[in-house]
Amino acid sequence: MDLTSYAEWAVRLANDPDPPPELRPLRDELAAVFDAAGDHRDVVERLNALLVRYPVRPQLSDHDGSGWHLHLAEDYGAGAVMGLAAAVAELGVDRLGRCQEPHCERAFLDTSSNRSRRYCSARCASRANVAAYRARLKSGQ
């Protein structure tokens, strides 16, 4: 079972500036997981606490015509928490990040093969590269 889409839900929710009221507490807790990314023990403790509060209820489904397959739950929170926990277990805590573009700070999950992602999107990477280029021109380099 590929849990990547569930982990992506967690990232989208952590970055959502205006989630539905019932998801705001989870959004804040997921954002805190990304904020703690430099402290592996803290990330794991936060995720373990979320796994207790948002238990997964797997279900078989054939809703999309692709045959029977597993869904973690109809509960958005449980899927997001389980997906993020699985990503940390598989890829490592150091794959959680915050965008390094100074005006952004969005969360991301680094799934690159060389663990080199520093920005949440190509747009932020481009913006940061242009700013660095302009700064070099201004300083005469």
Image (cartoon, grey):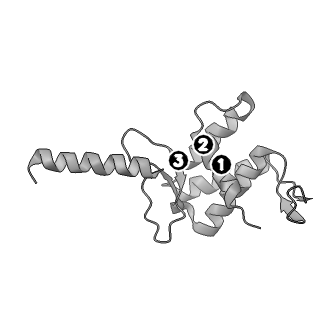
> Looking at the image, is 89 positioned above or below residue 79?
below
Q: Is residue 140 left or right of residue 83?
A: left
CB under 8 Å between discs 3 and 2: yes
Give the left or right position of residue 118, taking residue 33 as reference: left
Q: Earlier in the sequence, mark 3 or mark 2?
A: 2
Determine the residue positioned at 62% across, 45% down: 12
Q: Position of residue 5 (x, y in %)?
A: 69, 57
Which residue is rendered at x = 58% and y = 53% of the image?
A: 42
Amino acid at dot 1: Ala
Q: Give the structural element (helix, strand or loop) at label 2.
A: helix
Q: Which residue is mark 3?
A: 107
Amino acid on which the number 2 mark rests in the picture: Ala
Find the residue positioned furthest to the front: 65
Q: Quadrant of the N terminus?
A: bottom right
Instruction: Give the quarter of the image for residue 48.
Output: bottom right
CB-based contact (under 8 Å), mark 2 and mark 1: yes
Q: Is residue 84 above or below residue 20?
A: below
- Residue that carries the numbered disc 2 in the rendered image: 14
Residue beneath disc 1: 10
Q: CA distance from mark 2 to mark 1?
A: 6 Å
Distance from Cα at disc 3 to Cα at disc 2: 7 Å
How far apart are the two marked residues, 1 and 3, measured between alpha carbons?
10 Å
